[in-house]
Image: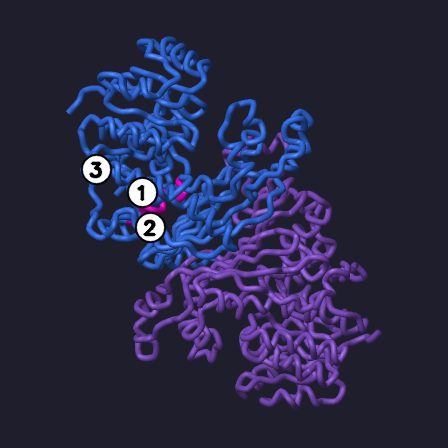
Chain colours: A purple, B blue
């Protein structure tokens, strides 16, 4: 077991530069290298680490220099979506376990390539799906395992986040979302919601996803936003956005559960992952933060949902995940309410212990494949599209393992 | 204009016998006849009306006697779902305007027949969709008309009501739901949610529904319920329920809005119609009773949805529908929180004034057609199925009319 881990960080946009701030809080992480294709971001990252009292890392605009650097134990990849899998594959081929930020894939081929590279090299990639470590997501996982919801029938989640400003000003901020929103129409960000659901349903561990079908609304949110902002007219005044305002995707599973995913990023709204678990004995629902159980004292208020607003809080004492029982203010403040801290720890502990990560290439490939598959479904009027079994049958015998507090399986 | 209306009531199960109680509170309604295929229900209805100080109506088990009774101005139909359209058609053919309770259709043919009979006879049928008169639904309608939500992009609604007891003990209670749940798998109850949404989106009035596709979960809720109740074992111990626990249906419209309907009646949960309206300027959402608008003071709390729980209440003063501003305690207590009162008034006022009802055969046919179409879609793996234009092009020129406070158009 290693006492500390030498990492390289590739991709220093909003996410990458935020995450080096969290990593810098952890004494067992040494950031040896930082990389971005834009030199100013590299300079800022180096400066930021030095200001935090850390040794100045090597800075580069060529990620090959990071992968070839002696002593690197793992790399963290937070580039544009288009390069996630490509760089993870190159990293595995160099013998370096990779931590890959979230996003959707572009083709099924690259998902297969991710899996095959792991199988050929024996070197892993972990998908850094922080929402798998969300407080409520982990509490629901605990409750589901304890049978509180009974036989689970339906789960839903959404990436419901007003991104209009981020998308519209993307050009200026060199953000990859703009080009994606202009040219693609799909469930472009499935993993925040699908990750925690997949853990609860045992996807790739006894269960698997069979098909996905997607439907969408018109695309008017971004156009309306551009109309409202004069400074956007020169660049986006005549732009047509391919991305629908709302995309719904339905996934069927071998065990008969239905999963609903929603992408909802172009209209004004409060943030919500809309995380919902429904079973024969009860439910958790994020909107309203509600738990409802099949018990007499619940039935008497069934017509008055207000009685259940915030009720989930009462289950924290019994069902909070152990990870969350020990969550300090420092972790909470580190980013996204504690999730960022925990997902980094899950990665680093896997590197230190030389164990497989809790979210592996099979998970990453399956979850990320929803993006190109939803695109195909939308192009075919919502027809159901088959989801490959990236485990090639191994899902049947892949068992939950619980040898680390970070294991979600 | 008539001063009072002579009605016959056909169908005296839970809904019919409840509604005669409401009608008996209205001085301008004379219930001349009550009918059900079960004599005990007829006897109880007669008794109930006499106890309320009303003249004893004619009681019969043959609805033809009601349709043939001299002086009947209109009939109210609350039989099993299977007979709604059949009796409405017979009523129109006899020259009697009908009020038809909610439910789905069984075939497209009967939907077409409903429309054709109206067109041939000039006698109308009103669908008694009480949820079109719901307080929040009408407030949202007002807000939508006033542009508060901007360009509307997405609407959703659900019939989310734990009906396990009603379905399981249906045999004993002679309820039509049991046979439907045993033998059919479809969106069997689309109108509570689709009705109010159709009014907001101008369906059949400038806009129309194009296609529906449905997906579903497994069916385990009813089996689990039967297992828990020993007294059900003799009759339902080996029963297989065809109806999925959760059915989701997606409707596309000519103007590009996406509509999501959910049937969710076989798992424990609080009641919710999940009514949601999303536009370029804001949203209403029933779960949490939230309004969120695209304004600075909302954005600052976008990460904390709790701040918006119950916020819709603040919009009542400005946007409550005039109908609801004058709603008395008597109306509220009459049934389903006031909706039953209002839908009866809408019907009776149409009869008295000799005007067309606010919810007509084109609405009824379109909304009810979702049931057989969802069944076809589910049988075909979720394939999108075309929704007929029951107006045969007239929807393009059908205008909203506002000559009565009950008009929803």
Q: For residue B42: magenta?
A: no
Magenta highlight range = B191-202
- The reply to whether callout 2 and callout 3 are in contact (CB within 8 Å) is no
- The reply to whether callout 1 and callout 2 are in contact (CB within 8 Å) is yes
Local SS, label 2: loop
Residue A82, placed above or below residue B175: below
| Separation (CA) of disc 1 from disc 2 | 9 Å
Task: Decide which of tag 2 and tag 3 comes sooner along the chain.
Answer: 3
Number of other residues with Cα within 10 Å of mark 3, as a class: few under 14, some 14 to 19, many 20 or more: few
| Separation (CA) of disc 1 from disc 3 | 12 Å
The chain to which mark 3 is attached is B
Number of other residues with Cα within 10 Å of mark 2, as a class: few under 14, some 14 to 19, many 20 or more: some
| Separation (CA) of disc 2 from disc 3 | 19 Å
Position in image of residue B305 (x %, y %): 50, 52
Task: Decide which of tag 1 and tag 2 comes sooner along the chain.
Answer: 1
- The reply to whether callout 1 and callout 3 are in contact (CB within 8 Å) is no
Q: For residue B194: magenta?
A: yes
Residue denoted by label 1: B112
Task: Decide which of tag 1 and tag 3 comes sooner along the chain.
Answer: 1
Position in image of residue A30 (x %, y %): 72, 79
Local SS, label 3: helix
Q: What residue is drawn where x is 41% and y is 27%?
A: B79
Residue B134, placed above or below residue A156: above
Residue denoted by label 2: B388
Position in image of residue A129 (x %, y %): 63, 66
Q: What residue is drawn where x is 33% and y is 17%?
A: B24
Residue denoted by label 3: B120
């Amino acid at each position: 077991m290693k006492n500390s881990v030498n990492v390289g960080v590739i991709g220093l946009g909003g996410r990458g530069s935020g995450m080096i701030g969290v990593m810098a809080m952890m004494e067992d992480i040494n950031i040896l290298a930082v990389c971005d294709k834009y030199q100013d971001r590299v300079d800022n990252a180096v400066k930021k680490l030095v200001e935090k009292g850390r040794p100045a890392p090597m800075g580069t605009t060529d990620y090959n220099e990071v992968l070839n650097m002696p002593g690197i134990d793992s790399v963290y990849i937070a580039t544009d979506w288009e390069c996630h899998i490509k760089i993870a594959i190159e990293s595995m081929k160099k013998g370096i376990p990779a931590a890959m930020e979230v996003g959707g894939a572009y083709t099924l081929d690259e998902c297969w390539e991710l899996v095959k590279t792991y199988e050929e090299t024996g070197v892993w990639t972990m998908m850094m799906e922080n929402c798998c470590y969300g407080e409520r997501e982990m509490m629901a996982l605990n409750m589901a395992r304890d049978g509180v919801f009974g036989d689970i029938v339906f789960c839903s989640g959404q990436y419901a986040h007003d991104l209009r400003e981020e998308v519209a000003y993307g050009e200026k901020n060199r953000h990859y979302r703009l080009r994606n929103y202009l040219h693609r129409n799909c469930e472009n960000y499935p993993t925040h919601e699908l990750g925690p659901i997949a853990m609860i349903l045992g996807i790739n561990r006894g269960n698997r996803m069979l098909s996905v079908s997607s439907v969408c609304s018109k695309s008017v949110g971004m156009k309306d936003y551009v109309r409202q902002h004069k400074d956007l007219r020169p660049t986006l005044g005549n732009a047509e956005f391919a991305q629908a305002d709302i995309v719904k995707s339905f996934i069927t599973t071998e065990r008969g559960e239905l999963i609903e995913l929603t992408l909802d990023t172009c209209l004004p709204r409060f943030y919500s992952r809309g995380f919902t678990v429904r079973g024969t004995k009860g439910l958790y629902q994020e909107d309203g933060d509600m738990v409802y159980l099949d018990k007499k004292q619940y039935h008497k208020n069934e017509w008055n949902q207000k009685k259940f607003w915030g009720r989930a809080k009462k289950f924290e004492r019994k069902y909070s995940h152990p990870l969350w029982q020990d969550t300090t203010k420092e972790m909470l403040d580190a980013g996204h309410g504690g999730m960022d801290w925990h997902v980094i720890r899950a990665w680093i502990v896997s590197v230190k212990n030389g164990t497989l990560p809790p979210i592996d290439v099979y998970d990453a490939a399956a979850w990320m494949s929803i993006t190109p598959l939803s695109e195909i479904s939308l192009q075919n009027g919502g027809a159901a599209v088959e989801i490959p079994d990236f485990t090639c049958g191994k899902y049947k015998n892949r068992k939950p393992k619980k040898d680390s507090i970070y294991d979600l399986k």
